[in-house]
Amino acid sequence: MPRPSQRAAIVDAALRCFAELGYDATRVKHIADKAGVAESALYRHFPSKEAIAQELYAEFLRSYAEKLLNLAGSDQKPEGKLRALVALILDTYREEPDAFIFVLFNTSRRLPSLPAGTVYPLDVIESIIIEAQSAGVVRDGQTNLLAAILLGAVQQPVVLATLGRPGALNLLGDRGYDVIITEAALAAVGRTPC
Amino acid sequence: MPRPSQRAAIVDAALRCFAELGYDATRVKHIADKAGVAESALYRHFPSKEAIAQELYAEFLRSYAEKLLNLAGSDQKPEGKLRALVALILDTYREEPDAFIFVLFNTSRRLPSLPAGTVYPLDVIESIIIEAQSAGVVRDGQTNLLAAILLGAVQQPVVLATLGRPGALNLLGDRGYDVIITEAALAAVGRTPC
């Protein structure tokens, strides 16, 4: 019977290969080598590279959505919840930068099919926006659009941080940018100023 | 000698294949069939799928940066320029949605190497932010970070529009969202309200 710990090691190794070599160039052999298992052992867990990527997606989104749902259900006031939301997104990037980038910045690649009932992070963010809009803290407008605007204002700095060219942000090592990202994201969805 | 019109048809066909099949699943044969040329004719223009993708990247970024540079050099006032910037980004998506998505939402794939001297859209957007900051229209803060925040607030709705799931935005067909995107993006980088 395949060992569960091996399964987790394979998924983790795949993520590191995707980050280092790119998804396209990664072969099952690279993943097996990185995980320290034989290719035959890998195939007892997963039929293909695509299947490993699918597990990566599903597991990352499940864990991310769970954290977001906990925040959405907390008893903070709406503005505090919006601030905590921005911190949660940046912390999730800092905890698992490779997974964050692989899963969230792959829109042009066809997403692997996710299990029915998958909770999407954007939907939870929208629920926080809806609550804040009802409380008068967020501007009028379609709530999934406002959720996307807030998310973009927080995530695009992460994209800039990953470009690896001169002048790129060091978001991983420096929390000094968080204040401006938080203020800007809240202003983007906030009520229009007097 | 390879015909130039054939070259453009091949790049255009490749883009449509990438959008329909995904980049990974696209083979040179698909591109040749879609372009209506023999594979041997395609290979007179490009050695590989990767080379076609590289031309797509370079050509899209060149044209996008040119439009941005024209705007940056125009004699509009800073706030008008910021508004025109948001419109330019959304219009660029509407004019070439497949290219916009393929080139800009592929951060986890290794970018093909671009010609030296390539002007990146974010750098031009930063120059507009710098001018607006000097004029007191944009909040204090590191200008490439503010440029990324503004760009994210405009681009993430495009991501939402491409997800193709219930509730996704129809940004291509409906300009009714542009007002809220513009106001939100300007508020994100704007001076903190009184």
Image (cartoon, coloured by chain):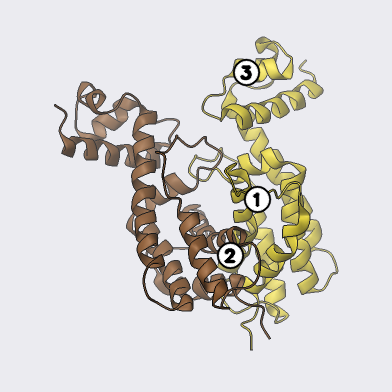
Chain colours: A yellow, B brown
Q: CA distance from mark 3 to mark 1?
A: 30 Å
Task: Name the chain under label 3.
Answer: A
Q: Quadrant of the N terminus of chain A?
A: top right
Disc 3 designates what residue? A30
Residue in the picture at 55% in, 61% down: B147
Q: Which residue is mark 1?
A: A169
Could you tell which of marks 3 and 2 lies nearer the N-terminus?
A: 3
Q: Amino acid at mark 2?
A: Ile
**Rendered position, A175 above or below A126:** above
Badge 3: few (under 14), some or many (20 or more) residues near its Cα, within 10 Å? some
Examine the image and state in which quarter residue B71 appears: bottom left
User: Is the residue A87 above or below the residue B188 in the image?
Assistant: above
B117 is higher (above) or lower (below) than B44? below
Mark 1 surroundings within 10 Å by alpha-carbon count, few (fewer than 14), some (14 through 19), many (20 or more): many
One can see residue B17 in this view: no
Residue type at mark 1 is: Leu
Q: Position of residue A54 (x, y in %)?
A: 62, 34
**Chain letter of the residue beneath label 1 in the structure image:** A
| Type of amino acid at the residue the image marks with label 3 | His
Camera-side residue: A114 or A72? A72
**Residue, x 49% and y 39% (percent of image)?**
A109
Q: Which residue is mark 2?
A: A149
Are labels 1 and 2 on one chain?
A: yes
Counting labels gives: 3
Q: Nearer the viewer, residue B30 or A36?
A: A36
